[in-house]
Image (cartoon, rainbow, N blue to C red):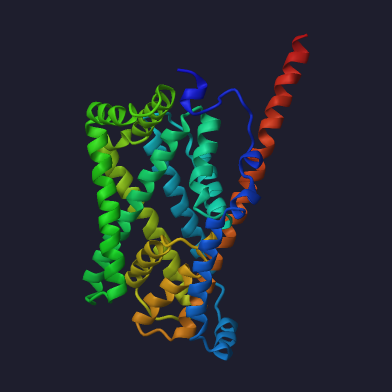
Amino acid sequence: MSNQLSGIDVSGHETPSKVLKWGVFFRDSKSWIGIGISVFFIVLIARQIHYDQLRDTFSTIQRWPILPALFIYFCGVYLRALRWQILLAPLKLIPSHFQFKVVCLGYMANNILPFRAGEFYRAHIMGQREGIARTAVFSSIILERVCDGLVMLFFLGTSTFFLQNALPIPFQMIMSFSLLFFGGLFIVFLVMVWNQTVSIRLFTRLTNLLPQRISAKFSDLFEHALSGLASLKGIKTSAAVFFLSVLSWLCEAAMYYFLFFSMDIDLSYEVSVLLVAVINLGIMIPSSPGYVGTFEYFCILTLTFFHIPYTVAFSYSLFLHFLLFLPITCVGFYYFWILSVRPASVETQRLKKEDNNV
């Protein structure tokens, strides 16, 4: 199979800086729709803030929980890298430290670019660097997101049980939509993986309506996409993926819980688990890069449900969002720089070896 059909160019040295063309995303009118949605949520939030209390709340923040909270958060990010390593293992066993770098790159790109472009970006980088079809890599990322969605639903259910509180209507709506969306996708993936021959045959029949060249290309992409879902075939592998998903998100919930102490919020760890679920399902709504507005809205919605004053809840949402945004974005930019300069150094070493041989 040619490199072109594989969806990769294993001979090239394309750098992340060439792949990530910043301006093109903001020239698309759809990105401004997301910004408009963010503005809508910001306006909803701003109407109820007492700004004199906001200053007092920030002035009393305790700093000691910040470092342990960030440490636990990055432990969760590393667990997601391990999970991705398992998902890609049927294609190629990739060192976890490189997986971690690419995951951080993806988070960085999601924070600064619209349309969750970080998912496409890390699929491209992983495919280009490791010689794997990018379609296969991207399908493994979609599977990651489906697992995350199912974990969020699991968190919603267990939190409701332990807290013994009936979820308000907005939470119930989020839960119902997420169950249909993520549950449906997971079932489709299972059917496709366990019936690959039938799936390929059906897809080929559909694409036969297209010109032969286009049909062959689509069929090839579909086969690569199925290969990225191959980890679903193993029960032990699927269990490991789900376990790492739960553990990584419990780490993020622990970060949220530590930051409760920073603002003297007297809520339990179960509430932080619920908070993780509501926020991450809520930010599925299209918005600006970094989920500005939607993140704060669903954080406030959850905290006020537990009788936290609105301005305190808003302050916490800003504080939490800042710590989720800045450190991982800085780490992502660091790895962006490292991976951007590395191809040049590799090429330089190759030329030096050729000169020595001469």
Q: From this viewpoint, is residue 309 visible?
A: yes
- Does residue 339 appear left or right of residue 133 in this picture? right
In x, y percent, where is residue 180?
25, 56
Seen as rendered, the residue at the extreme top is 358
- Determine whether 194 is above or below 187 in the image: above
**Camera-side residue: 14 or 326?**
14
**Camera-side residue: 104 or 171?**
171
Please give the count of numbered marks on the rendered protein: 0
Q: Residue at x 42, y 48 (%)?
A: 79
> Where, by quadrant of the figure, is residue 181 drawn?
bottom left
In x, y percent, where is residue 52?
58, 91
- Does residue 82 appear left or right of residue 66 in this picture? left
- Does residue 253 appear left or right of residue 161 in this picture? right
Image quarter of the N terminus = top left
- Determine whether 122 is above or below 308 in the image: above
In x, y percent, where is residue 328?
56, 56
- Does residue 282 appear left or right of residue 36 in this picture? left
Image quarter of the C terminus = top right
- Determine whether 211 is above or below 17 in the image: above
Q: Residue at x 48, y 79 (%)?
A: 45
Q: Residue at x 51, y 59 (%)?
A: 71
**Camera-side residue: 71 or 34?**
34
**Camera-side residue: 29 or 79?**
29
Q: Residue at x 22, y 33 (%)?
A: 194
Q: From this viewpoint, is residue 234 visible?
A: no
